[in-house]
Image (spheres, rainbow, N blue to C red):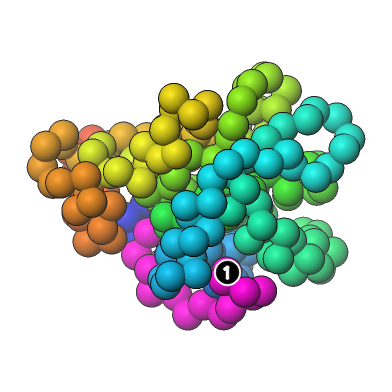
Amino acid sequence: MLLSELFSRCLSIPYVSVGSSADLALDRTNDTLTIYFQHSRGEQDWQKNLNFPARAYPRSEGIAWYVHRGFLSLWQEIEPYVAALLRQERTRTIAVCGYSHGAALAALCHEYIWYHAPQQRDRLRGYGFGSPRLLWGPRPAQLLQRWEHFTVIRNLDDVVTHLPPRLLGYSHVGKLLEIGQRGSYSAAEAHTAQNILAALKQYENASPPTSAETR
């Protein structure tokens, strides 16, 4: 599946609400389970997006690390559902995918699966389209390896992918794939779904396509 196809699926798949302000969808194809997280849709979502003082991740084992507080509070509502999925899906490959604030949730989901299902690590893949920055503070190698197979896709001028600012200590996790051409859109326009999709298709047409390894 091409990245443009995965993103189109992320935009069109029917979502269900979980908790107060999170929407996810499941797609089981052959031996792969793909977990999708929807983009910001309303005022409550944006309140979470802008709630970015850092907060410690609550697990006490291993490395102490910090993330965007608003995204963490959303993830904690979703976590029980993902935990139940992991108990059921013991043989499937798992992929996670999200757009905008859904991309940050996908990154937290990716880490959760990596940590709690070590048998899945080699087959786990994650994709965050137009993702905001998530991680705050130090970036030890043993922490970053949890997102070794997670890719952030940035349409170059996309303002959301530059927030929260690096000056506040925030950074992306995983690999950063930059698409599009600088100056083609305003910072806000570069974040829209239609412009990300157009940039993905241009990228795939101009170079050997990067496939989303979801099966």
Q: Quadrant of residue 150?
A: top right
Residue 113: x and y in percent read 73, 49
> Residue at (19%, 53%) from the top-left corner?
189
Amino acid on which disc 1 is placed: Ala
- Measured as percent of width and height from the top left, residue 79 is found at 74, 61
In this view, the residue in front, 103 or 211, is 103
Image quadrant where residue 94 sits = bottom right
- Residue at the location (62% across, 74% down)? 20
Q: Which of 91 and 96 lies nearest the eye of the viewer?
A: 96
* Residue 214 in sight in this render: no
Work out whether 23 lies above or below 73. Answer: below
Residue extent of the magenta highlight = 7-22
Residue 159 magenta: no
Front-most of 23 and 4?
A: 23
Question: Residue 82 lies in what quarter of the image?
Answer: bottom right
Residue at 53% x, 59% y: name it. 48
